[in-house]
Image (cartoon, grey):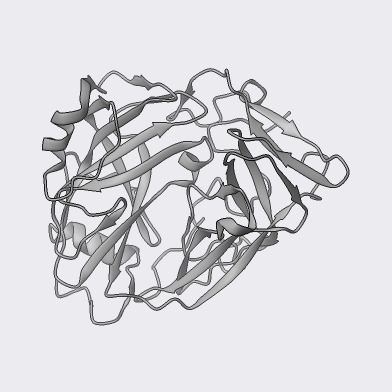
Amino acid sequence: MSSIDLSRPGILPCQSIEALIATGAITSQTPFDADQVQPASLDLRLSDRAWRVRASFLPGQRLVADRIADVSMHSIDLSGGVVLEKGCVYIAELQERLSLPKGLIARANPKSSTGRIDVFVRLLTDRGASFDDVAEGYEGPLYLEIAPQTFSILVRPGTRLNQLRLKAGEPPKLETRSVGVDLQGGDVVGFRGRRHAGVVDLDRIDGHDPRDFWEPLTLRRGELLLDPGEFYILASNEAVEIPVLQAAEMTPIDPSVGEFRVHYAGFFDPGFGTDEAHGAGSKGVLEVRTHDTPFLLEHGQIVARLVYEPLTEKPTRLYGEGGSHYQRQGLKLSKHFSPWA
């Protein structure tokens, strides 16, 4: 552990995450994938065990496995690939396990591709008091709550739905930037998920015709009406740039300025949208779900905020190096869909 300096508050870069793996602070049921460590995060993978549950829960002072026994409807073997139905709630055991050293905490987020297909996921830990947060010194297994909202999904052992950031201390919030919505970017300003679409196979890249799953949206009178209970993909009005010594998280706005929720997958790795990583001009894609009231959205309206935090040191690789589905993106669906024809 001596190769990792935890005295400086910040998010750990990829080389520190790899050092934690090498020293056994992060272990896995199967060998780690070569591309599993991102510039400032670690992708987490489903194991072969899952449960259909009747309700979401927090473990409180108990083990997750004990709480699953209270709410499980049936167990599921993911080995051959299983469809998780929309409108249902599942708990899956993850392959990775943590043994965090003192001074290190962690936080999880859905991956970009997960948020863009409206799959709600949250990390659970034994005796965890909140979703997605991992306490200092936590030693134990990781579980994932999975709740598909618009599309049913096909998953297998190894499917990656969320990612983990590791933090030394409490990094200071460097700045907060407002994010507006782009409703003038072209003939198509967004997409709305079709309610009765087929299954999205999460391991098939570019393997689905987007017309079977999405309805393109055009403007009327310069406004976009968001209907309650619908799921939308929109783009930010501003380009997003994450400096190489920082990471950022997209956070919801105050509900007093809009009856909708933006961001399911809100984590941006260092180098996103930068010249250094050949990504200048990248926009943020916004996953939007309305609440109970129809809402008229106008071009440029503030819908989310970006909160920047420092890294402990510069990562040895940046977002998009070696290829990325989302570097230099505009309005773009998840990687599971072929380009809109």
Q: Quick one: 330 or 61, which is closer to the camera?
A: 61
Q: Is residue 262 above or below residue 150?
A: below
128, 341: nearer the viewer = 128
Query: Where does the image place residue 92, in percent across and percent down from the top left?
Result: 26, 33
Residue 56 is situated, as x and y percent measured from the top left of the image, at: 30, 36
Report x, y in % for residue 201: 45, 25
Say which quadrant the C terminus sits in: top right
Question: Is residue 82 positioned above or below 65 on the image?
Answer: above
Question: Total label count?
Answer: 0
Front position in the image: 88 or 240? 88
Q: In which quadrant of the rendered image does the N terminus lie?
A: bottom left
Q: Is residue 263 above or below residue 278?
A: above
Residue 195 spot, x, y in % from top left: 59, 22
| 107 left or right, relative to 99 | right
**Quadrant housing residue 44:** top left
Left or right: 205 as drawn, with respect to 36: right
Where is residue 10, by image quadrant?
Answer: bottom left
Q: Residue furthest bottom?
A: 7
Residue visible at 56% across and 30% down?
Answer: 206
